[in-house]
Image (cartoon, helix red, strand yellow):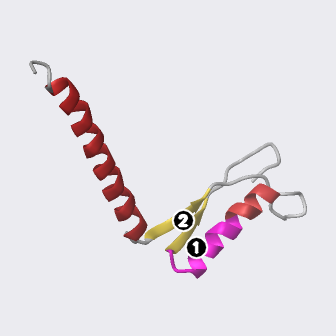
Amino acid sequence: MKYRWLLILPAAVMLWLAVHTTVVLADGFTERYPKAVAAVVLGNRVEPNGKPSERLKARLDRALYLYQRQEVSQVLVSGGLGKEGH
């Protein structure tokens, strides 16, 4: 057949895609990611009584969790000047 490659090429591409996907997934499930140096906590509103907003509290709690699990060795908390002040 003159155009036999029209059948073989798509089959070869699909086979390569299946093998490649399997290898990438298997590698992702077994790889242990390196620990980060620091977690950056983006700032958010602080209530007038000094308590963090719910969003900020969730961010701080997650940073604490990562620090306690020794996934990060430092926590950097950022903030800024809003209409409420610092």
Residue 25 in percent (x, y) is at: 39, 58
Residue drawn at 19 percent across, 32 percent down: 8
For label 1, count other residues whose C-alpha is less than 10 Å away and answer few (under 14), some (14-19) or many (20+).
some
Q: In which quarter of the image is residue 23?
A: bottom left
Q: Main secondary structure of the magenta part?
A: helix
Which amino acid type is shown beneath numbered disc 1? Leu
Residue drawn at 10 percent across, 21 percent down: 1
- Comparing 59 with 27, the one in front is 27
Magenta region: 60-71
Callout count: 2
Q: Seen from this angle, which residue lies furthest front?
A: 1
Residue drawn at 37 percent across, 63 percent down: 26
- Comparing 65 with 53, the one in front is 65
Dot 2 or dot 1: first in sequence order is 2
Residue drawn at 63 percent across, 54 percent down: 42
Q: Quadrant of residue 46?
A: bottom right
Residue 80 in percent (x, y) is at: 67, 50
Q: What label sits on residue 5 in the rendered view?
A: none
Q: Is residue 33 magenta?
A: no
Q: Give above or below for 21 relative to 40.
A: above
Which amino acid type is shown beneath numbered disc 2? Ala
Q: What label sits on residue 66 in the rendered view?
A: 1
Frontmost of labels 2 and 1 is: 1
Q: How far apart are marks 2 and 1 (CA)?
A: 8 Å
| Residue assigned mark 2 | 39
Report if the CB atoms under discs 2 and 1 are less than 8 Å apart.
yes
Q: Give above or below for 49 relative to 7.
A: below
